Image: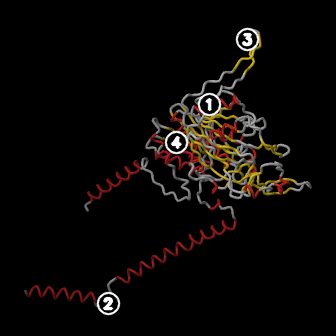
């Protein structure tokens, strides 16, 4: 090869490498070896480019101080870079260190955190950021603080879709019971909905439900919601609105006496039964239950297994249902059993979401539920032992609970020309052609309340299920399955058992320090032995013999 050819080949090689680097922004390949593909985007996230008309701008504000201490900023950056690479130019990523100038980050509403710096003589604090701003046209979504991959993809994908489609992630809530208000009793759930990007509309019983509202949560209300209130809900369903019902047939006064009683239904339970799911009077008791701390009569603190608090395991879910994608179990507090009573029209289909264990039974009377009286809980268990449905869904065109009857009436007082008169609040008519819709029913009103602090699993599992229910009801089926994906990085610091952790660390050291070098040495020796064995044998005077042979061949040619 000439010098000129070598120069041309070198230039072509440099050009090819440069073009490959440019192409790498469009083509993306990663080997994800984690158990549940924590670093691989779901199909809905990879295909967001098909929904985006204008460019989406993602800015990740991360403080340099975090990079020297934690691994999560790099992991988050990697996931966001994959969004950019998969989008084919539709998503543009910028990673910024706010440094000492917080004005830009705070302008977007990012909330900083304090990081304690421990020195030899004194402790100081640093202001740090790890937040994401997503911009599309003139609209903005903000993730104030991100420190793990657990729900990162869910939050980013759902917010991009909301910005691009122009549809707000909105839901309405009716929480009619006086002691279980939305802002206080369901405070955990309220914060979770806000954190997931939902705008929550609180509705008073009987208040008009906006036709544009996609999803409605009804939490309790068997004794509070009268026919006028139920008409509003029924009409919402007839118009295609999707509803989550958290219901109970037994009321437990756990604020004071821990005594229970059957609820007097004003129509809510009957209406839901007419749609296709009936609550059986009674409470579910289950051997798969939570541990409850309590003080006995001698004021000694004890822990007992409490059957009325049901622990639903992963294997008790219907994994064919979209709602149980990534299901990590839930805990229910004084749950009531369900069974199907589907309409004869055949236009409604029902599916079980999850059940109790096979070792569950029913308490149908004498609702004394104090932990110290647990010996009485198993009374009559033999007659009712077996698996119970605890959550179910319905899909189809539902019959109207108010079909063929007069609209309920309600009056309000109003001053008319100086006279106080009662004026009727007239209800709008039912639609003539009901639309297909979805309903979810869970036989518990407390799973999103403060009792989750007693949960044996992560507090987020109940909340995650309720968030996934909101997504499924809102017909975001394709993003339901990505919310519960855990990072699953396989790092040694995630092994909590000290003996197992020490064993794994010891094996890793032996593998890297001894086994791998030994295998490399053995492979080298084998290669040397193989080459030596295959080489031709030589002996003293061999070179002279070759010279004599060549000279004789030359003499023979000269004679010819």
Q: Foreground mark, 2 or 1?
A: 1
Q: Residue 358 got which mark?
A: none
Left/right placement of residue 193 relative to residue 176 reads left
Residue 344: quarter of image = top right
**Residue lying at 38% horizontally and 82% vertically, measured from the top left:** 532
Find the distance from the CA under tag 4 to the CA under tag 3: 62 Å
Q: Residue under circle 4?
A: 94
Mark closest to the chain's N terminus, 3 or 2: 3
Find the distance from the CA under tag 2 to the CA under tag 1: 109 Å
Mark 3 lies on a secondary structure that is: strand
Mark 1 lies on a secondary structure that is: loop
Q: Foreground mark, 3 or 2?
A: 3
Badges 4 and 3: C-beta atoms under 8 Å apart?
no
Residue 220: quarter of image = top right
Mark closest to the chain's N terminus, 4 or 3: 4
Looking at the image, the residue that sits furthest to the right is 298
**Residue lying at 63% horizontally and 70% vertically, measured from the top left:** 506
Q: Residue under circle 1?
A: 403
Find the distance from the CA under tag 4 to the CA under tag 1: 57 Å
Mark closest to the chain's N terminus, 3 or 1: 1
Question: In the image, residue 360 lies at what x, y percent?
Answer: 72, 56
**Which quadrant of the figure contains the C terminus?**
bottom left
Find the distance from the CA under tag 4 to the CA under tag 2: 71 Å
Left/right placement of residue 4 relative to residue 449 reads left
Residue 515: quarter of image = bottom right
Q: Residue under circle 2?
A: 539
Looking at the image, the residue that sits furthest to the bottom is 540
Question: Which of the two residues, 510 or 403, is positioned nearer the viewer here?
Answer: 403
Q: Residue under circle 3?
A: 416
């Amino acid at each position: 090869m000439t010098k000129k050819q070598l120069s041309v080949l070198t230039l072509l090689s440099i050009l090819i490498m440069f073009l490959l680097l440019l192409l790498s922004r469009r083509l993306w390949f990663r080997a994800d070896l984690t158990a549940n593909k924590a670093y691989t985007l779901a199909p809905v996230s990879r295909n967001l480019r098909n929904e985006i008309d204008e460019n989406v701008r993602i800015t990740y504000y991360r403080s340099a101080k975090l990079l020297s201490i934690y691994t999560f900023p790099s992991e988050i950056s990697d996931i966001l870079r994959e969004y950019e690479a998969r989008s084919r130019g539709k998503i543009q990523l910028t990673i910024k260190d706010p440094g000492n100038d917080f004005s830009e980050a705070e302008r977007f509403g990012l909330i900083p955190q304090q990081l304690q710096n421990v020195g030899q003589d004194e402790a100081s604090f640093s202001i740090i950021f790890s937040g994401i701003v997503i911009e599309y046209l003139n609209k903005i979504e903000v993730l104030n603080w991100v420190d793990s991959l657990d729900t990162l993809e869910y939050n980013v994908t759902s917010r991009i879709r909301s910005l691009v489609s122009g549809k707000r992630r909105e839901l309405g809530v009716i929480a009619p019971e006086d002691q279980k208000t939305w802002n206080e009793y369901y405070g955990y759930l309220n914060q979770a909905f806000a954190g997931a990007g939902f705008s929550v509309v609180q509705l008073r019983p009987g208040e008009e439900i906006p036709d544009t509202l996609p999803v409605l949560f009804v939490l309790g209300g068997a004794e509070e919601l009268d026919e006028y209130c139920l008409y509003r809900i029924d009409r919402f369903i007839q118009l295609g609105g999707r509803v989550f019902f958290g219901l109970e047939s037994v009321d437990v006064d756990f604020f004071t006496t821990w005594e229970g009683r059957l609820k007097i239904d004003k129509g809510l339970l009957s209406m839901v039964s007419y749609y296709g799911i009936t609550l059986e009077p009674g409470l579910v008791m289950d051997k798969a239950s939570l541990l409850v701390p309590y003080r006995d009569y001698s004021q000694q603190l004890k822990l007992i297994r409490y059957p009325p608090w049901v622990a639903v395991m992963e294997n008790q879910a219907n994994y064919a249902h979209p709602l149980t994608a990534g299901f990590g179990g839930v805990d229910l507090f004084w749950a009531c059993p369900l069974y199907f009573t589907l309409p004869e029209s055949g236009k409604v289909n029902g599916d079980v979401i999850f059940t109790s264990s096979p070792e569950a039974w029913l308490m149908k009377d004498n609702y004394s539920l104090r932990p110290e009286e647990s010996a009485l809980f198993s009374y009559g268990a033999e007659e009712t032992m077996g698996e119970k449905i605890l959550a179910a869904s319905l899909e189809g065109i539902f019959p109207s609970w108010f079909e063929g009857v007069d609209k309920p009436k309600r009056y309000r007082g109003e001053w008319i020309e100086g006279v106080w008169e009662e004026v009727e609040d007239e209800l709008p008519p039912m639609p003539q052609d009901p639309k297909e819709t979805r309903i979810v029913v869970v036989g518990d009103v407390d799973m999103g309340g403060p009792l989750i602090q007693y949960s044996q699993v992560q507090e987020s599992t109940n909340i995650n299920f309720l968030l996934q229910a909101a997504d499924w009801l809102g017909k975001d089926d394709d993003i339901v399955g990505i919310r519960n994906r855990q990072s699953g990085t396989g790092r040694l610091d995630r092994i909590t058992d000290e003996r197992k952790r020490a064993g794994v660390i010891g094996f890793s050291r032996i593998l890297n320090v001894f086994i791998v070098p030994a295998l490399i040495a053995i492979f080298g020796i084998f290669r040397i032995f193989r080459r030596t064995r295959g080489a031709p044998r030589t002996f003293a005077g061999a070179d002279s013999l070759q010279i004599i042979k060549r000279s004789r061949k030359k003499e023979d040619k000269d004679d010819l």
